[in-house]
Amino acid sequence: MTESRHLDEIHRLRYALWGPVDDDARRVEEHLFAEACEDCAREIAMLRGAQSAMERIEEPSAAVLRAVQDQARELLEPFESELFWFTAEPAPLMAGVRTGATADRQVVCKAGEYHLDVLMHPGGRDGRFAVSGQLLTPGDLPAPAVPVTLFIDRRPRTTTRTNGFGEFEFETHEGGHFGVRVGETSSARHIEVWSAEDLR
């Protein structure tokens, strides 16, 4: 592959793991679909397959975990240093606030121009959660088509957009810190909605 045509290997890897989280990753996606590049499609499918296989491993060895952590830190150090995290603070309840089961954890707060309502749904062993939520405008109207990115241990995992009701959801994941990024570019807000340290 020529890098000029297929973009940088790091950008392809980040797109494979987390989707179109920034301009470079979005260019990878555009390249995939606009040019129907079979080489890049195969590479990204392979990387996603490896990621899926890793998620199915119940207890990887300490050596594997350390190697993955070291690689992730090296890969994401420039990206992580740019983020400023807000701790979720209570906000007045508004129309459309979700209600959850007793075991669920709920956070309602402001996220830039939006009101954010997030539910953490425990799943399986400790530290595993599914995340769902809703974004509302200050006028208590649903905020559709807003990008929302799930962060686990302050690293981007996957991105979606709110539906017509301002709702979003992510599958069950494991981690010590869960957060979401609302919006994109310089106007985005990073909200940490739960930390394992809160239970100590």
Image (cartoon, grey):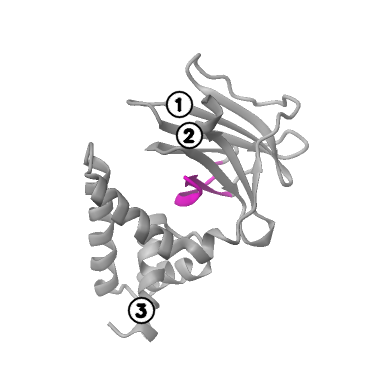
Seen in the image, is 48 located left or right of residue 102?
A: left
In the figure, residue 135 lies in which quadrant? Answer: top right
Q: Visible in this render: residue 185? A: yes
For residue 131, the mark is: 2
Residue 27: x and y in percent read 46, 71
Q: CA distance from mark 2 to mark 3?
A: 33 Å
Where is mark 3, residue-wise?
6
Seen in the image, is 29 located left or right of residue 104?
A: left
- Which is the main secondary structure of the residues drawn in magenta? strand
Q: Is residue 190 above or below residue 12?
A: above
Q: Is residue 41 magenta?
A: no
Q: Which of the two labelled residues, at mark 2 and mark 3, occupies the earlier sequence position?
A: 3
Q: Is residue 55 above or below residue 119?
A: below
Where is mark 1, residue-wise?
121
For residue 165, the mark is: none
Q: Which residue is at the front of the view, 168 or 77?
A: 77
In the figure, residue 124 lies in which quadrant? Answer: top left
Q: Is residue 151 magenta?
A: yes
Magenta residues (range): 147-163
Rendered residue at 23%/61% (across/down): 46
Q: Which of the two labelled residues, at mark 3 and mark 1, occupies the earlier sequence position?
A: 3
Does the residue at mark 2 contact the one at mark 1 (Cβ under 8 Å)? yes
Residue 21: x and y in percent read 49, 59
Q: Which of the two labelled residues, at mark 2 and mark 1, occupies the earlier sequence position?
A: 1
Q: Nearer the viewer, mark 3 or mark 1?
A: 1
Give the SS element for disc 2: strand
Amino acid under label 2?
A: Val
Amino acid under label 3?
A: His
Rendered residue at 59%/35% (across/down): 134
